[in-house]
Amino acid sequence: MDWTKAKNILIVALLVTNLLLLGAYVLREMQRSAAEDEDTRRRILTEYKVFLETEIPKQPAPMAVLFVRPETEDRARIEQALAEQAPIPDDDRESLRSAANAVLERCGLMTENTELAAPFETDGGATTLRYRDVFDGIPIEESYILCTIKDGRIAEIRRKWYTPLELHDTKGEILGPIEALLQLLPEKDKEEAVVVRDMELVYRVDPAGPVAESPVGDTALPAWKITDDKGIITYVAAYAQ
């Protein structure tokens, strides 16, 4: 047996084992530190009376800005579709949804990005169906289509819409959900309780204008949409600094 060769193989094996153990140790310490940081952030939220009644979203992957085109309503086409609609046979949700979808199809407003948002809104004798604008599973704020149904007919359609065009070729790191919630603290009184009912990642058209060159229209940036128990919505810019 070549003992020199065997010794070298043994040394290499030991080095590889030590490196694997070291890597496992470093990973375990990083995970422990991340968990401690998460616990610290949650304690801060509790101290400032920010309570969560929803699951915390997972950390998103890096995202690019989305170029969008604002759309205008063709009121003549909408009014014609409303005038030609068939009566809604029942007031169950499926019938209301089917009738609204049919009218939106005739108006040319039902696209691959149009998604019905739940729940249905009922006020007195009217029911409102709210549709939202979604790109690759992420809503585009603050887009909407509102279909108001009264007396078995769609009485009104209101719309604010952005058509997604393309993503920018550069992606940025996204702020974690807990870090986003911490951004609420400077804006609130420490004694004021805030109950978070919903939290989701959205695209939102930048009110200050485009931050990157857009071929047509506007720029929608990633943002955290935070909704409290009073229905108040707060948007937090999602790009990490």
Image (cartoon, grey):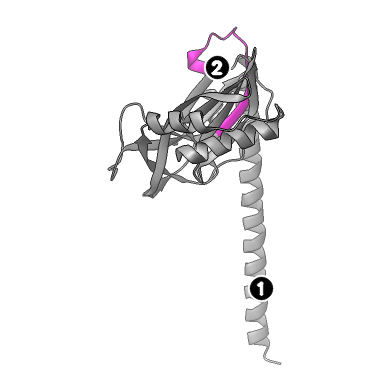
Say whether residue 155 is magenta.
no
Q: Is residue 92 left or right of residue 236?
A: right
Q: Position of residue 119 (x, y in %)?
A: 65, 27
Of residues 92 and 134, the one drawn nearer to the viewer in this rendering: 92
Q: Position of residue 151 (x, y in %)?
A: 62, 19
| Residue 73 visible in rendering | no
Q: Secondary structure at mark 1?
A: helix
Q: Position of residue 187 (x, y in %)?
A: 48, 14
Look at the image and tell me in which quarter the N terminus lies: bottom right
Q: Disc 2 to disc 1, how far (Cα)?
A: 60 Å
- Vertical arrangement, residue 60 with respect to residue 10, above or below: above
For residue 232, the mark is 2
| Magenta-tinted stretch | 184-200
Disc 2 or 1, which lies upstream in sequence? 1
Q: Which residue is mark 1?
A: 13
Q: Amino acid under label 2?
A: Ile
- Vertical arrangement, residue 118 with respect to residue 115, above or below: above
Circle 2 packing at 10 Å, graded few (<14), some (14-19), many (20+), is few
- Vertical arrangement, residue 172 with respect to residue 43, above or below: below
Q: Secondary structure at mark 2?
A: loop
